[in-house]
Image (spheres, rainbow, N blue to C red):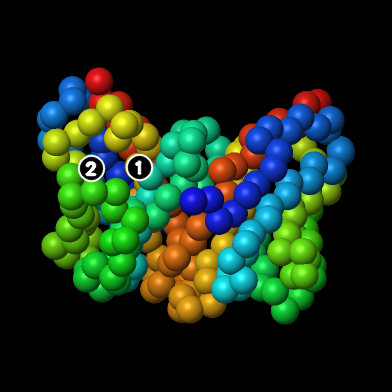
């Protein structure tokens, strides 16, 4: 079992650029979560999907952030335009369904200069 | 708005000692309280979890103590080992959620076990 796969692992970009983070959940898992981790705010849930449908996006900070899940094996989190305050580690997690344990990926460390 | 307060921020304990990490919450709708362990460069992993119908849960060397009236819960690690050195997060989710999809995390405790 490969676990949750995220890419890229590290991303450095300049303010104003578009950033796309990618996630492949564990095969057979129906729920997918995007989190952001910073020193100041800890781990925050941004959005989660169930059966590819966004269920709750109340944690998405603003309209610059968007997330999609076009199929059961792929999701993206896009930031456009990026700002320095978006610098954080972004985690993707998946679970069999929303009642079950969430398994986290290794994260993408984003630095916006 | 931080709904789960975690302390201490960092903790250094001698091998064999019992580190204790504390969390407090305000939202009485919370009814699921997991702890996650995170090693550097890795994502958090579920360690142990408790619901408020019990006051204590043990899994191996890890114990959660829960005080519903005080709205506090804590993680104890018995016979701590250098391999337990990691960042630990408490979390909570509300009764209205079906499972743990609405987790609110504490800010984490960096634990170091010295030989």
Query: Are labels 1 and 2 on one chain?
Result: yes
Q: Taking A53 as reference, is B65 left or right?
A: right
10 Å crowding of disc 1: few (<14), some (14-19), many (20+): many
The residue at 69%/42% (across/down) is: B7
Residue A82: where, in percent of width, then height? 19, 34
- Check the residue under mark 1 and report the chain it is in: A
> Which structural element holds mark 2?
strand
Residue B43: where, in percent of width, then height? 46, 44
10 Å crowding of disc 2: few (<14), some (14-19), many (20+): many
**Which residue is under mark 2?**
A21
Which mark, by number, is residue A112?
none
Of pointers 1 and 2, the one earlier in the residue sequence: 2
Compared with A76, B53 (above or below) is below
Residue A85: where, in percent of width, then height? 31, 31
The residue at 24%/67% (across/down) is: A54
Residue B2 visible to an observer of this rendering: yes
- Toward the viewer: A17 or B86? A17
Question: Does the residue at mark 1 contact the one at mark 2 (Cβ under 8 Å)?
Answer: yes
Name the quadrant of the C terminus of chain A.
Answer: top left
Residue A46: where, in percent of width, then height? 34, 54
Q: In which quarter of the image is residue B55?
A: bottom right
**Which residue is under mark 1?**
A90
Compared with A5, A110 (above or below) is above
């Amino acid at each position: 079992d490969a676990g949750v796969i995220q890419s890229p692992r590290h991303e450095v970009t300049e303010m104003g650029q578009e950033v796309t983070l990618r996630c492949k959940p564990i095969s057979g898992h129906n729920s997918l979560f995007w989190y952001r981790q910073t020193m100041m705010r800890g781990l925050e849930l941004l959005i989660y999907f169930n059966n590819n449908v966004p269920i709750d996006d109340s944690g998405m900070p603003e309209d610059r952030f968007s997330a999609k899940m076009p199929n059961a094996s792929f999701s993206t989190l896009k930031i456009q335009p990026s700002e320095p305050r978006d610098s954080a580690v972004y985690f993707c997690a998946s679970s069999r369904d929303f009642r079950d344990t969430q398994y986290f990926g290794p994260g993408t460390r984003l630095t916006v200069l | 708005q931080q709904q789960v307060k975690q302390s201490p921020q960092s903790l250094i304990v001698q091998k064999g000692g019992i580190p204790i990490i504390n969390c407090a919450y305000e939202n009485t709708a919370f009814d699921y309280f997991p702890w996650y362990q995170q090693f550097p460069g890795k994502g958090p992993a579920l360690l142990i979890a408790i619901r408020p119908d019990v006051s204590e849960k043990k899994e191996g060397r890890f114990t959660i103590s829960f005080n519903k009236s005080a709205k506090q819960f804590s993680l104890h690690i018995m016979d701590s080992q250098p391999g337990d050195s990691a960042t630990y997060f408490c979390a909570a989710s509300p009764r209205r959620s079906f499972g743990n999809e609405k987790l609110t995390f504490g800010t984490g405790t960096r634990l170091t076990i010295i030989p």
